Image (tube, helix red, strand yellow):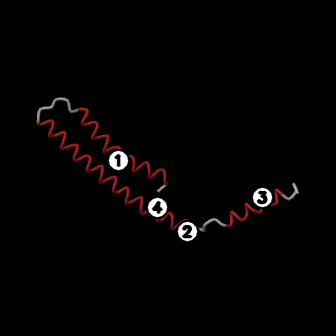
Amino acid sequence: MKRYLPTFCCSLLALGAMAQPGISEMQQAQQNLRSTFFSAMDFALVLATILGIIGALRIYHNWQMGQQRIDEQVAAWFFASFFMVLAGAFLRGVFGL
């Protein structure tokens, strides 16, 4: 009985290997990922632009109102916008697109 156990396990592994999806399914999944990813990348860049414009307007308003310490606000809005741009580049690197 012990002699047939490795043969039985190998035959189960072979059945599992034949059940994998084919090349065309993998290419279709990659195409779907690319189309979704690039629309998300465009959204991230638009969101970074909107954050930059809103931040610039708020900082300009506070500066014109006489607020002296606006350095923290400049850094916060800049890095919020910069994070959105880097997040898109990071996702592009992770997915290899």
Q: Is residue 47 above or below residue 26?
A: above
Check disc 1 and report its element: helix, strand or loop.
helix
How packed mark 2 is, by other alpha carbons closer than 10 Å (few <14, some 14-19, many 20 or more), is few
Residue 67 occupies quadrant: top left
What amino acid does circle 1 point to? Met
Real-space CA distance between mark 2 and mark 3, rounded to the nearest whole angstrom:
28 Å
Q: Which dot marks residue 84?
A: 1
Q: Earlier in the sequence, mark 1 or mark 2?
A: 2
Circle 2 or circle 3, nearest the eye: 3
Residue furthest bottom as drawn: 24
Real-space CA distance between mark 1 and mark 2, rounded to the nearest whole angstrom:
32 Å
Q: Position of residue 94 (x, y in %)?
A: 48, 50
What amino acid does circle 2 point to? Glu
Pointer 2: what residue?
A: 25
Real-space CA distance between mark 3 and mark 4, rounded to the nearest whole angstrom:
35 Å
Q: Which dot marks residue 33?
A: 4
Check disc 2 and report its element: helix, strand or loop.
helix
What amino acid does circle 4 point to? Leu
Q: Which dot marks residue 67?
A: none
What amino acid does circle 3 point to? Cys
How packed mark 3 is, by other alpha carbons closer than 10 Å (few <14, some 14-19, many 20 or more), is few
Q: Is residue 49 above or below residue 30?
A: above
Pointer 3: what residue?
A: 9
Q: Earlier in the sequence, mark 4 or mark 2?
A: 2
Circle 3 or circle 4, nearest the eye: 3
